[in-house]
Amino acid sequence: MSVSPAPASPSPVAALPVPRRVAAFRTEGFPMLPIAILVTLALLAIFAELIAPHNPEIGSLGQRFKPPAWIAGGSTQHLLGTDHIGRDVMSRLIFGARVSMMVGFMAVIIAGVLGSALGILSGYLGGWVDQVIMRLTDTWLALPALTFAIFLAAIVGPSEWNIVIILGAVYWTRYARVIRGEVLSLKERDFVRLAIVAGCSKWTIMRRHLLPNVANTAIVLATLMLGVVIVSEAALSFLGVGVPPPKPAWGLMLADGKKGLMAGYWWLTVFPGVCIVLMVLAANLLGDWLRVKLDPQLRQL
Amino acid sequence: MSDEPLLELDRLSAHYVTGRGTRVVKAVDEVSLSLRAGETLGVVGESGSGKTTLALAILRLLPTAAQIVSAAMRFDGEDLLAMSPVEMRRIRGKRIAMILQDPMASLNPLFSVGDQVGEPLRVHENASRRSAWERAGALLRSVKIPAAGQRLREYPHQMSGGMRQRIVGAIAISCEPRLLIADEPTTSLDVTIQAQYLKLLRDIQREHGLALIFITHNLGIVARMCDSVAVMYAGRVIESGPVRRIFNSPIHPYTRALIESIPRLGEGPERLTAIDGQPPDLASLPVGCSFQARCPRVMDHCREEAPPAFDIATDHNARCWLARP
Amino acid sequence: MTILLEADKLTKHFALRRGLFRSDPGAVRAVDGVSFSIEAGRTLGVVGESGCGKSTTAKLVLKLEEPTAGEIRFEGRALHTLNADGLRQYRRSVQAVFQDPFASLNPRMRVDSIIAEPLITNEKIDKRQARDRVGKLLDMVGLPARSADLFPHEFSGGQRQRIAIARALALSPKLVVLDEPVSALDVSIRAQILNLLVDLQRDLGLAYLFIAHDLAAVAHMSHTIAVMYLGQLVEYGPAKTVASDPKHPYTQALFSAALPSHPDESRDEIILTGEVPSPVNPPSGCRFHPRCPHVMPRCAPEVPKLRTAFGRETACHLYE
């Protein structure tokens, strides 16, 4: 082979070929706070039985409406007070984290998988498939999400799994739209054309070329949707069609605590509210950071 | 036309310091150039050579992260580095103008052509809207845009690439600058449109006595348009001189390889002379001459010490140990 | 010389969407009645400016688009008559290298997967065989073996183009469509890649359809040149003949506009007036007549036919 004598070596690569995703986490701006919050909440959720001081579902009526420990009348037995049935607020918050995270993550995964799949099919296949899926998306999006969720919940009855499925079914449309947009531009890229020229089938192209390249967008969207889903779950529970009592869920705690607000039992709403805010905030901050971190690199490529 | 250089750069450097002071990218390093009124200088280089950074440095348009250091940077006798932001603003667009590569990016899609061509006149000469509009029409005619009056009211997206580039040219010459810096203005144009445009630039230059700095990666443009040429590599000018001299007797191996790697119309050898390797990473330049990894005539000394610019003849110098007398 | 691929009055019109108030939406006549042939082991260079239809022609040859009229015959068989098996055969014989080295490679795949993809899709080979073949291909294009484990973003533009070439060669094709293969590369890298392509042609007997706007590169690489304007062929013949003595006024203008390689290289300056018209509403008769320096009265109403003159074919009333 009589090409130039010294074959060119690849341009300088950092010490080891670190996969791009891992390298991203080593740079500045690492979101300590959101990750810390989410990890803490996850740990609380997983080890709830070990951490929570009391049973979240059973309380003693003699201990009702006890304020948080630092206020007159409170005790260290119930650091964050008790509710109208005498259940320990802190234990309910800890167990509630489990419900919120479980519902949140599972719903996001279901919505993500469904929405991404439909988005890819719609964007790549085009034609009537695209039309059908897009019209479906349009009608779905036109329905007010929460109202629709309530409607579905009222029909199938409240239970944790039902809520997960309902929320997944309601929120897939956001994914489908965004992923379809990306696929539309991806399919004009040369490497997709070359895959066609190499003889790949449509399914292979969708699986091997489109899916990995929309994965980043899907992940970022997922973190942003997490916030929305958790608030929705809280709203559903608040309205009584979410997670059924006595299982503790933050939204449910808000609903129950509402009654005590006028009487001055503020801790029944404030603490669950703070938890919801923290989780949603953490998810959004993480999503924002991921979006910035992952996208410019993709563009660089 | 006086014999004093219109533009004089003496050891101009633009360094970017990044990563909290750990990395220094020497985008432009110790560049010395001079240009007389009415002359055309070609600045040739590939991606990463620093040619665009050089253009921006002259107009002091680099971001604050870039530290410009220069022994002297004089335009028409005045020190550009000593100027305040207000004074620089009065120079940009009025006495030194610039044309960029992508005309669509240079024009604002929301404003009419007439507004944009007249803008420098309103800014620099306090022209009224009406008089700026009329003069804009005359300017469009001078860049050979047909139906100029109608074009004034149109928007950039309604025009072809070649026409947009002419509009950009009209904006550039509107205040009769003395120096025009053109950064790859024809790269996005078709071949015949490029020929039209280059002829237009030559005509404008002759008519207005403009000095022109033509930044390009295309030696063909240099051969057609330029009086003198400076070849850049990894931020440094590695050879400069009158264009015929450079083409006839290039000293630096990079210059020579560049000239020989261009396919020639008509007869040409079967194989083109190729330059091995890749352009260097500006953040990690080797000790010594930055071309050492790709040089067919590299010597041990090249790896130890970077060569200074040696004078070969009047106005012809090269940064190469081969040129050492 | 055996004829590998033949285009016969190839036509591709893209219909424009019907506007609300428009009765006849018209069409973009991207390619209009173009005929050419490519011989085995030889290069056909296609030149032209924006809107001339050369990229669409490439897509038609690659079967990324279907022609509106006319046909393409490969080894004697018309493409539109191919069944699934025939199509698979065709795809194995005809591959492509595109302009943008950054968009041609899936950023998520490693180089060995990228190069091996055509192999895995079309042949039953196991991992080890694929790996071997990838190694040989990398060697053929002058890249080190360890490139196989890296990702595209770890390579420079010229190296990525080599990867793209290796991939195009994976199935040992007979024809490679090169659509502006070096335009996006640095000048000093272009010669490397052009040399590589010439060497590969000689060693593997490849035929090329070489599309570029750099006239000198096309003239250097090609055995035959086709000049396109607004979807039609205006001149077609042996490369040396067309490049050194163009006859069609457009070809003359094109070659005179090509930049010189030396300041003393003089060329008749033929500066065309006007813009390149859009292929939506091409001019009547000879499509070049509004800009032609030698226009005659019959050029507007009458379409010139492609005729042999001075050792090449040209479509111009001057030579009838």
Image (cartoon, grey):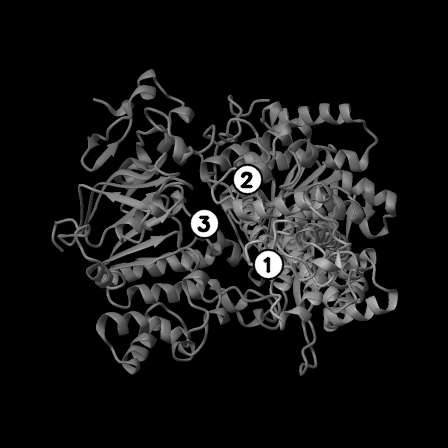
Q: Residue A27, labelled with which disc?
A: none
Q: Nearer the viewer, mark 2 or mark 3?
A: 2
Q: Are marks 1 and 2 on the same chain?
A: yes
Please state which of residues B210 and A140 is positioned toward the viewer in this rendering. A140
Please state which of residues C31 and A146 is positioned toward the viewer in this rendering. A146
The amino acid beneath tag 3 is Ala
Pointer 3: what residue?
A: C258
Horizontal relation, residue B274 to residue B86: left or right: right
Chain of the residue where label 2 is placed in the rendered structure: A
Residue reaching furthest top?
B300
Q: CA distance from mark 2 to mark 3?
A: 49 Å
Horizontal relation, residue B247 to residue C128: left or right: left
The quadrant of the picture occupied by the N terminus of chain A is top right
Residue B134 occupies quadrant: bottom left
Please state which of residues C86 and A67 is positioned toward the viewer in this rendering. A67
Can see residue B289? yes
Q: CA distance from mark 1 to mark 3?
A: 92 Å
The amino acid beneath tag 2 is Phe
Pointer 2: what residue?
A: A25
- In the rendered image, residue B106, in percent from the top left (x then y), is placed at 41, 62
Q: Are marks 1 and 3 on the same chain?
A: no
Would you call the spot at circle 2 few (<14 residues within 10 Å), some (14-19), or many (20 or more)?
Answer: few
Disc 3, SS: loop
Horizontal relation, residue A244 to residue C310: left or right: right
Pointer 1: what residue?
A: A73
Q: Are marks 2 and 3 on the same chain?
A: no
Q: Residue at x 15, y 54 (%)?
A: B76
- In the rendered image, residue A235, in percent from the top left (x then y), is placed at 70, 66
Disc 2, SS: loop
Q: Residue at x 79, y 42 (%)?
A: C90
